[in-house]
Image (cartoon, rainbow, N blue to C red):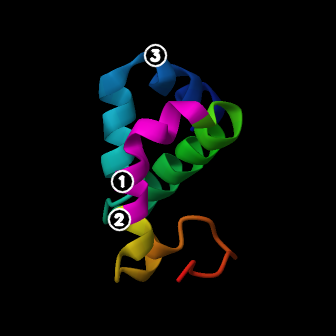
Amino acid sequence: MDVKNLAKDAISYENLFKELLSGVKSKDNTIRSNSFQTLLIISKDEPEFLYPEWDYFHDLLLSTNNYHSHLYPGQPHPG
């Protein structure tokens, strides 16, 4: 999957962006990984686009689900 182009499309299409947000919680590893990678690209290229979703990402960081709480592999839990 071309996550770079998916990231560009997600900025223009709200429904696609919402799918990515829900995709990071998917039980399907491929969907979860692709969603995460795409959102990571958006966070690097257009971080201000993600600001309205700050509470959503904050909740993921506080999640007891280990995968959700470590949004960026290799980074320690913030709290």
> Looking at the image, which residue is at 70% across and 41% down?
44
Instruction: Kindly identify the amino acid type of the residue bearing the numbered disc 3.
Output: Ser
Amino acid type indicated by mark 2: Asp
Q: Is residue 76 left or right of residue 63?
A: right
Q: Confirm or deny contact between disc 3 and disc 2 (CB under 8 A).
A: no
Instruction: Please give left or right for residue 6 compared with residue 58 in the image.
Output: right
Establish if 60 lies above or below 44: below
Residue identifier under label 3: 12
Q: Are marks 1 and 2 in contact (CB under 8 Å)?
A: yes
Task: Choose mark 3 or mark 1, whichever is in front.
Answer: 1
Image mark count:
3
Name the residue: 34% across, 23% down: 14
The percent position of residue 32, horizontal first and vertical second, equals: 43, 57
Q: Which residues are magenta?
A: 48-58
Helix, strand or loop at label 2? It is: helix
Tell me whether circle 3 and circle 1 mark residues in contact (CB < 8 Å).
Answer: no
Q: Secondary structure at mark 1?
A: helix
Residue, far top: 12
Of the two numbered discs 3 and 2 on the same chain, state the one appearing first in sequence: 3
Q: Residue 4 is drawn in which quadrant? A: top right
Point 35% across, 76% down: residue: 63
- Residue 79 position in % (x across, y down): 52, 83
Q: Look at the numbered disc 3 and give the secondary structure of its residue.
A: helix
